[in-house]
Amino acid sequence: MADSSVTFADVEAAARRLEGIAHRTPVMTSRTADARADARLFFKCENLQRGGAFKFRGAYNAIATLTGDQRRHGVIAYSSGNHAQAVALAGRLQGVATTIVMPKDAPEAKVGATREYGGEIVFYDRYTESREEICAALARDRGLTIVPPYDHPQIIAGQGTAARELFEAVGELDILLVSLGGGGLLAGSALAARALSPGCRVIGVEPEAANDGQQSFRAGHVIRIPVPRSIADGALTTYIGASNFPIIRAWVHDIVTVSDRMLIDTMGFFAERMKLVVEPTGCLGAAAALSKRHHQPGQRIGVLLSGGNIDLPRYGELLRGGAGAVT
């Protein structure tokens, strides 16, 4: 059964808090993409969201629901980049101090934006240190409230507003393809789909090298993996969140994977044909759609483009396919 602590009513409440704050991002289409996928594709462009990713929705919603005392003391988060930027920006907008634990190898564009939004950054080594332990220790020592990147009811509810807007814009869908890291976006999207398009198949999409979600989905319990390596830096989680997994098990229909090479090809398609900058993680759902492996011809498919934050030199390297482009 799904976790009853998060419902579509929470997604609706989050949408009210975000009204006029978060961008109602456009839904874009492409006849070329439709022809390649042999389907009707609807791209929800969260790469054009404030902070450059869907993460702003959950971060703002979570901070907006804190008590006055929690807001005065400040918050702390851990993230490879998009949640970091989102928390820093949401905190600035609401007058809440933010501290962010980030890996030393996080993309410089994400580090720079987090600083510009006012976040204090604490670096760690993702391969030898635990970000959760570092975050917990700082929260305890400084009296900060942790705003996790995905394993939190208000984060799930906030992320679900992206899919809610997509269904409002285009109506019911046959399939919804959602990027999967820790599961907040996928869980929230599943709640929205169940309420607004009950016949829609919800499919999570992971990098091949980071398929902890797929393994967990097949096994029926959360499986942890070593820190993976992929160009999809926003999906390099090692396990699905405890709040997300019951929702995913109940309302998600499948979890599939795509290769780094497929992500690069999809980035190139967006840049060349749709004039969109989409980061590798943001391309997960679209890469699955363009592969034609997971749908029937002619179906209506929604795709959440989850983010567009990437260092320009790295972006160029990936599109050129230069040495070291694919890990």
Image (tube, rainbow, N blue to C red):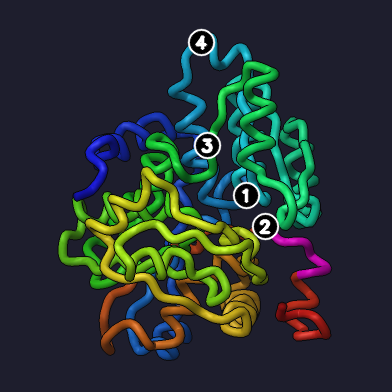
Residue 51's spot in the image, x, y percent? 62, 45
Q: Which residue is drawn at 62% across and 76% down?
A: 267
Q: Earlier in the sequence, mark 1 or mark 3?
A: 3
Residue type at numbered disc 4: Gly
Q: Mark 2 points at which residue?
A: 309
Q: Would residue 322 appear left or right of 262 to someone viewing this image?
A: right
Badge 2 element: loop
Q: Note whether 177 is above or below 244 in the view shown.
A: below
Q: Which of marks 3 and 2 is nearer the N terminus?
A: 3
Q: Badge 1: how crowded within 10 Å, few (<14), some, or many (20+)?
A: many
Q: Note whether 92 is above or below 117 in the view shown.
A: above
Mark identifier at residue 82: 1
Q: Name the residue under label 4.
A: 68
Q: Distance between the residues labelled 2 and 4?
A: 32 Å
Q: Would residue 231 appear left or right of 293 to someone viewing this image?
A: right
Q: Would residue 300 appear left or right of 215 to someone viewing this image?
A: left
Q: Name the residue under label 3.
A: 59
Q: Which of marks 1 and 4 is nearer the N terminus?
A: 4
Answer whether residue 12 is visible to the viewer in this image: no
Q: Badge 4: how crowded within 10 Å, few (<14), some, or many (20+)?
A: few
Residue 200's spot in the image, x, y percent? 22, 66
Q: Residue at x 63, y 16 (%)?
A: 143
Q: How far apart are marks 1 and 4 (CA)?
A: 26 Å
For discs 3 and 2, the disc positioned in front in the rendered view: 3
